[in-house]
Amino acid sequence: MAKIAFQEFNFQAKTLEKIALADKIIRIYKNQGFTLTLRQLYYQMVARDLIPNNQRSYKNLGVIIGNARLAGLIDWNSIEDRLRQLVTVSHWSSPAGIIRSAASGFRMDKWRNQPCRIEIWVEKDALSGVLTPIAEKHDVGFFAARGYPSLSEMYSAGQRFARYARSRQEVHILHLGDHDPSGMDMTRDIQDRVSMFASKTLNVNRLALNWDQIELYQPPPNPAKQTDSRFEAYVERYGDESWELDALDPATLASIVEPIILELRDDKQWEIDLDIELDHRNDLDNAAANWHDVAGFLEDYK
């Protein structure tokens, strides 16, 4: 845990209590392997009736958590900003190091011999920290659309899916978005546009957020945006409240996505390709461990 103090604050007792509760929630999810965004922490506190559900409350929590981190009361690594991160190139101290790194990252396309191809599409980039580990674990593509996907991205996806179709593979897009006027429409938009570019009707499965999940998990609601052009049609069907995908518990989100992937996968073929992948990874590990001999062998061919 990286609780490092940089400034002193004279917190009121109520604020210290709120900080302690936030820290407890953070540690619960950290132990499950999840790092929360500020928005996710906010919704977890709203769901526990610790703070009200409004914009002022969200802003106040941001100030409190920021000050708590500066005071050394909240772990600096406990809150993620998934939109603002430094990008650097990788470095190694020797050729053996890069081979060792290549071994740990070596992956075969294990869906190449599967009857279908799966991609996870999510409306918000802020949820990539929850869903990317699942995508990587099962070697499926992950795409954070950040709202309605651009025309360029839709075209690229359509061409990619058309190639899969020519290989007689069925495409499945697992879509997750907010339950609000635009969030609900995005699933329809993806279905229409990506199918057009692929010249084939594709399977777009809206996994969340759906009405039955709202009834089951009871996430805190927000007023639906009246300025949204789809507001009236949405209200006729669902009423004037909306719900954000971020409000779902991260473990719940993972439990919604993972079973669908496993259901679509041919496990027998997966194990065959997994064994081949492991053999190749071991070859790279051996090359790194015996780099002196490998380098000597290559020297003879200069």
Image (cartoon, rainbow, N blue to C red):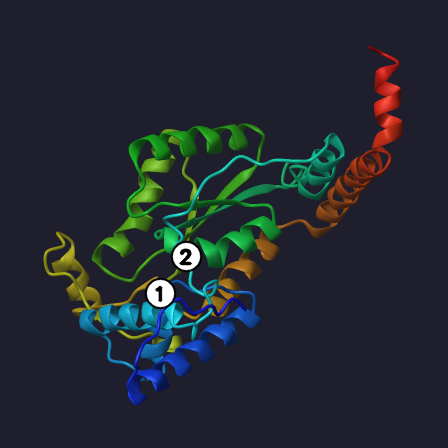
Residue 271's place in the image compared with 1, above or below, is: above
Residue type (three-letter) at the residue carrying disc 1: Leu
Which of pointers 1 and 2 lies earlier in the amino acid sequence? 1
Q: Nearer the viewer, residue 218 or 25?
A: 25
Query: Residue at point 32% right, 47% down?
Result: 146
Instruction: Residue under label 1, please give it.
Output: 38
Quadrant into which the N terminus falls: bottom right
* Extreme residue toward the bottom, this view: 13
Instruction: Residue under label 2, please give it.
Output: 127
Label 2, secondary structure: give it: helix
Query: Residue at point 15% right, 61% down?
Result: 225
Please state if 40 lies on the left or on the right of 268 as rendered: left
Q: Nearer the viewer, mark 1 or mark 2?
A: 1
Instruction: Estimate the x, y position of residue 161 in percent, counting from the top left.
Output: 47, 33
Can you see residue 10?
Answer: yes
Residue 296's place in the image compared with 174, above or below, is: above
Query: Looking at the image, do the residues carrying marks 1 and 2 touch, with CB atoms under 8 Å apart?
Result: no
Query: Residue at point 79% right, 44% down?
Result: 275
Residue type (three-letter) at the residue carrying disc 2: Leu
Q: Nearer the viewer, residue 292 or 195?
A: 292
| Within-10-Å neighbours for mark 2: few <14, some 14–19, many 20+ | many
Q: Nearer the viewer, residue 136 or 75?
A: 75
Q: Splitting the image into 4 quarters, where does residue 32 fall?
A: bottom right
